[in-house]
Image (cartoon, rainbow, N blue to C red):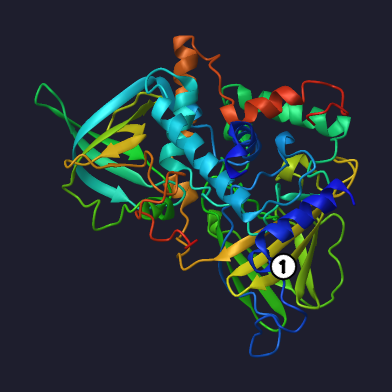
Amino acid sequence: MTARTKSLTAALAGVGAAALLVIPAAGQAPTTSWGAPDLRGTWDFRSITPFERPASFKDQEFLTPDEVEAFEEAVRTSREERAANSDYTENQSDVDVGYNSFFIDSGTRMSGTMRTSMVVDPPDGRLPAMTEDARERARQRYATWARPPRTPADRNSAVRCITGFNAGPPMAPGAYNNIMEVFQTEDHVAIMTEMVNDHRIIPLEDGPPLPDDMRLWKGDSRGHWEGDTLVVTTRNFTGHTAFRGTTEDMVLTERFTRSSEDGLLYEYTIDDPATYAEEWSTALEMRRTDDSIFEYACHEGNLAMMLMLRGARLQEAEGTGEDQWLATWYQGAAAAVQDSDPDRDDK
Amino acid sequence: MPRTIGFFVVAGVLATTSVVHSHHAFSAEFDANLPIQIRGKVTRVQWINPHSWIHVMDEKADGTTQEWMLEAGTPNTLLRRGLTRTILTVGTEVQVRGYQSKDKICDPICRGSGRDITFPDGTSLFMGSSGTGAPRDGADATEPPR
């Protein structure tokens, strides 16, 4: 028995199957009036499940309910302590903490998958190594973001209100606006995220692929049913969105499966050899929510770009333009790609 | 066993989840060296994604006033904190701590961030309330039942 099998066995023994993610047997998922699996509704994808498996979990793939509860409590305690102990005045990191306390809405619960990470493949729960070319692209991105912005183009597409940072494809839990609504007809599925009110209309019928030179910010999505699972393949990206550093040639495969009355299992696989040496996949269970999706007014309501550009010009005039502009949450990743060895342990 | 999941795991979580996704560096928009404390009445609330804006007429010690607009979370983020349209109404007396914008421009209105907000009865929102990760205190009606 492998260590992983042992941990799963222990999890099953400790909690009982009812508490684990239950995938309805084929044909048992809720269906629409025309007999398709019913994915409709508003789904909350907030989660505090780590994206990659923390080293302290070693080879443990699943958690018991007690461990999930303890993990959630530990996160809550950590956030409280950080907020209580933060220095209000003149502290760069506290500005980001202030942001967190006031703005961040990433949830308080782990995913119903009860996994130690969202990454499920590779089996160690860690992303494959990035290629050296991808690391160089990352270094250039971070170098641009670390300097005072000269034009709006010096900031990423999310800051510029072109795309949403968690809206996908693929959808990935972020700081806020972590809900989406799914609409269905017999031959189309539409997904609208609250973030930027991004929407995708996904045809479910075969058709000719887009020409290779026709590129879309969110790619071209095509879907089909495999049993009770909606499988969506997306190609023809632009490369501007660069989800986790990927290129325009990324092939994204998403899988949507009703896991329970109030659960939607969401899995995706990233295939982009120019960025990652191997394919990798994640799994997350979204939860049904009664929350409403609010209208987005990113350009109209977001004064950040104006304040950043004016602030940069003022700092230049005052001779303080070399201020640190890279958000604290990027600084670890930026430091990691400075090492040219793609096989380093922390990837 | 449950208590053995400790700080190291949590630190890993914070490090992992914080790497990729957020809108902009808060510190790119506001100046950590310009902390502000605003006290006065709410004059307007703009419930806008991705950031709500709360307008407050600051009543300064010298008797003059200065209007501020303070950046806040998304409408859903505020609602999950229990901050609804019926609570945060025009005329509500509040005290807000935050940071001024890097551009320092106050014409026609000063802009800043809202780090936390306190009401006359001492109730403080955003810091340590549900949804930011604090214990479930009943304030977050949308928190799924356990």
Q: Viewed as shown, does residue A207 lie left or right of B22? A: right
Outermost residue to the top: A319
Report helix, strand or loop for mark 1. Answer: strand
Q: Nearer the viewer, residue B64 or A229?
A: A229
Quadrant, the N terminus of chain B: top right
What x and y, as percent, mark residue A122? 85, 47
Task: Residue A287: name its quadrant.
Answer: bottom right
Residue A35 lies, with reference to residue A147, above or below; the image says below
What x and y, as percent, mark residue A247? 81, 44
Report in which chain the residue with disc 1 lies. A
Q: Residue at x 87, y 29 (%)?
A: A132
Q: Is residue A282 visible?
A: no
Q: Residue at x 68, y 90 (%)?
A: A34
Q: Residue at x 68, y 57 (%)?
A: A14
Q: Can you identify the residue that label 1 sits on?
A: A256
Q: Amino acid at mark 1?
A: Phe
Q: Residues within 10 Å of mark 1 (few under 14, many from 20)?
A: many
Residue A45 lies, with reference to residue B72, above or below; the image says below
Residue B39 lies, with reference to residue A19, above or below; the image says above
Q: Nearer the viewer, residue A147 or A342?
A: A342
Task: Residue A154: name its quadrant.
Answer: top right
Task: Residue A211: name its quadrant.
Answer: bottom right
Q: Viewed as shown, does residue B131 lie left or right of A116? A: left
